[in-house]
Amino acid sequence: GIEYIDSYYFNQVEHIRFNSTVGKYVGYTEHGLKNAEAWNKGSELAQEIGELERYCKYNAANHYSAVLDKT
């Protein structure tokens, strides 16, 4: 399977991450925890899942096909 990760950094510190395997945002700092809680309840979560469907799964099939053509 594939895994889609979208991380948000500030001053080289990861504050929050969406991980498609977990299926929600996870915060890693005090600020990130607050955002993760809000984003998991809001439209941001649906947008991330939409990106997974629209971009990742679509392109994964194309890349997989290209790899098979080379073998």
Image (cartoon, helix red, strand yellow):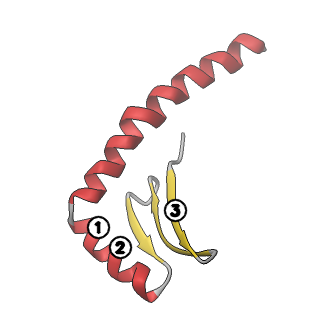
Q: Residue at x 54, y 41 (%)?
A: 2
Q: What's under tag 2, amino acid-wise? A: Ala
User: Tag 3, which secondary structure?
Assistant: strand
Q: What's under tag 3, amino acid-wise? A: Ser
Question: Which residue position holds label 2?
Answer: 36
Q: On screen, 17 above or below 4? A: below
The answer to whether 47 appears left or right of 26 in the picture is left
What x and y, as percent, mark residue 39?
A: 29, 67
Callout count: 3
User: Tag 2, which secondary structure?
Assistant: helix
Label 2 crowding class (10 Å Cα cut-off): few <14, some 14-19, many 20+? many
Q: What's under tag 1, amino acid-wise? A: Trp
Foreground residue among 35 and 4:
35
Q: Quadrant of the N terminus?
A: top right
Q: CA distance from mark 3 to mark 2?
A: 11 Å
Q: Residue furthest top?
A: 69
What x and y, as percent, mark residue 30?
A: 43, 88
Question: Which residue position holds label 1?
Answer: 39
Question: Which residue position holds label 3?
Answer: 7
